Amino acid sequence: MQQQALPLLPETAPAFQALPPSVAVAQTAWRRLRLTTAVETPTTMTVEMTVETPTTMTTKKESAAMGTNAIPAGYRQDHQGRLVPENLIKPIDLARDELVAEIIGQALPLQGMLAQLKKKTIGDIKAFVALSAEQYGAKVGGKKGNVQLLSFDGRYKVMLKQHEHITFDERIEAAKALIDNCLARWTEGSRPEIKALVERAFRTNRKGQLRTAEVLGLKDLAIEDDQWQQAMAALMDSITVAGSTAYINLYERVGDTDQWRHISLDLAGV
């Protein structure tokens, strides 16, 4: 064990301005504290800090044997699970780690608050829809559809949208086979590009799933052919609703116009 004195800079420290560009990236006081450990500067005050100074890193196997929560004082665990002595970590890396931890620490509670807001809002809207239906002696059951609520003064609008996740069962293979038969008959002696235009609807995305919109778009083609109609029947029978996702959208009217401004709760949109 040895005593290591870490120099601190005053708030107006001119030496901080002389740091090399690779280090002079932090502006707040707590980052200046960390960055000054990498350079020699006049000492105005010192803080005594006791650290161990091992010269080797603990292996991942040794770290796992100690337990994921058993990180000794003076060490940091890196992304490979190794225990690294803090005095061997670059000050800029320590500063980056602290900044990321601070940002995430502030974001996680907000994420929880937004999740609770969404859950409560959906519940309140569904309860209001049921209350409104009772005024006419009606009882609403099952999943609610899209709902739009407008404030009395017309300034604010709340929308609840239900997006269904559609998949296809094994009958989509029968539909594909019937479509292939139609294409084989129609494109005999024709350019192969015609067949490619229809077959592209059965392309899969990066997850290996069919592109729902493109497949369903085939049923909108007004083709009077018995085999094609049979294929479309198989296609419609293969549709399965795997679930649904509820979306809440909030809007504010722009002045006295008929335009609406989205009230974004997304970091990318605020």
Image (cartoon, rainbow, N blue to C red):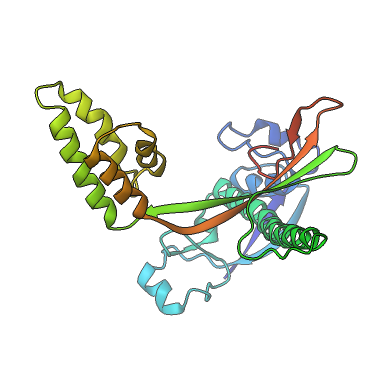
- How far across and down, in percent of the image, does residue 214 sit? 37, 38
Q: Nearer the viewer, residue 131 or 210?
A: 131
Q: Is residue 255 above or below residue 32?
A: above
- How far across and down, in percent of the image, does residue 29 sit? 75, 45
- How far across and down, in percent of the image, does residue 138 sit? 74, 63
Taking the image as drawn, is residue 26 in sight? Answer: yes
Q: Nearer the viewer, residue 159 or 145?
A: 145
Left or right: residue 24 compared with residue 62: right
Quadrant of residue 105 within the rendered picture = bottom right
Q: Residue at x 61, y 61 (%)?
A: 143
Q: Is residue 205 above or below residue 171?
A: above
| Quarter in which the N terminus is drawn | bottom right
Q: Is residue 20 above or below residue 10?
A: above
Q: Is residue 51 above or below residue 236?
A: below
Taking the image as drawn, is residue 209 in sight? Answer: no
Q: Nearer the viewer, residue 166 or 27?
A: 166
Farthest right residue?
A: 153
Q: Residue at x 30, y 32 (%)?
A: 223
| Quarter in which the C terminus is drawn | top right
